[in-house]
Amino acid sequence: MARLSLVLLAVSVSGLLNCVTAKAEEESWKLVWSDEFNVDGVPDKTVWSYEEGYSRNHELQWYQENNAYCKNGLLVIEALKADAPNPLYEEGSGDWRKSRERIECTSALLKTIGTKEFLYGRFEVKARIPVGGGSWPAIWLLGSGMPWPSCGEIDVMEYYRIKGVPHILANAAWGGDKRHESVWDSAKVPFSHFLEKDPDWASKFHVWRMDWDETAIKIYLDDELINEILLSETVNGKAGNHINPFKKPMYLLLNLAIGGDNGGTVDWDCFPMKYEIDYVRVYQK
């Protein structure tokens, strides 16, 4: 009986120490920047800039600033059906951006390049993502000063389809020995994993978090660890001058892509699609 009491006491003390350690860890983070999107209208132009036109991955959307707005405390990135001439169109062009005669849909990509760039910290984004056919929402970061992928890419969240099956991903990419050669550390979690825990998952807001320091990038969804990327393994190859891009500042991107290489078959009945962001917060120690 005495031995059992000692064991229980040890477990209790251990649990208390863990709680104290966790509390101290939480209290060490200080908010250094946030956007709460509490003003209706245009997102803060001193922070956010936009991509315009067709961008990457053979995606269907034409990016434009008008598809992003703040309303009721949310940043809304809205994908809309469209039927407009592609101003880049060139008959017979082999460039996918120029070979499309018509724009089928529009959306927005916001980024903090040149305004808010960070080295290490805790990043939190609370959002509700669209999951209809073709939707490809993302929360990601890029480095600057080097071409992709040697600049480094962190995907805190991507939602898209792999062989037709929806997944949520948490990734990092860096450069290999050849120009444009990428090396990936990817975690791909079937969307069914989250639906099994909550069938109404898609109707709710969720918190994506990244803890990034000199040793690792840890990406969480609602406090569930999705991927841990060790910075000891993320050094560029020859093309990237053997630099570790994740030990340099990076900027944030938020976007809703449609279709393309990974978005899957578009369900036009799901339009308009809305990607809603409650807040973006950055903490540092």
Image (tube, grey):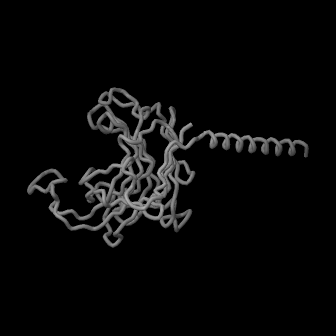
In the rendered image of this protein, does residue 242 appear above or below residue 258? above
Q: Is residue 145 left or right of residue 155?
A: left
The answer to which of 35 and 59 lies nearer the viewer is 35
Picture quadrant where residue 24 is located: top right
Residue drawn at x 44%, y 51% as measured from the top left: 157
The answer to which of 67 and 178 lies nearer the viewer is 67
Q: Is residue 102 left or right of residue 266?
A: left
In the rendered image of this protein, does residue 272 appear above or below residue 184? below
In the rendered image of this protein, does residue 161 appear above or below residue 172? below
Residue drawn at x 32%, y 57% as measured from the top left: 108
- In percent of width and height, residue 93 lies at 11, 53
The answer to which of 118 and 203 lies nearer the viewer is 118
- In percent of width and height, residue 227 lies at 49, 45
Picture quadrant where residue 25 is located: top right
Residue drawn at x 31%, y 64% as measured from the top left: 265
- In percent of width and height, residue 279 lies at 49, 54
- In percent of width and height, residue 95 lies at 16, 50
Is residue 227 something that shows in the picture?
no
Quadrant into which the C terminus falls: top right
The furthest residue to the bottom = 269
Is residue 23 something that shows in the picture?
yes
The furthest residue to the left = 91
Residue drawn at x 41%, y 43% as measured from the top left: 154
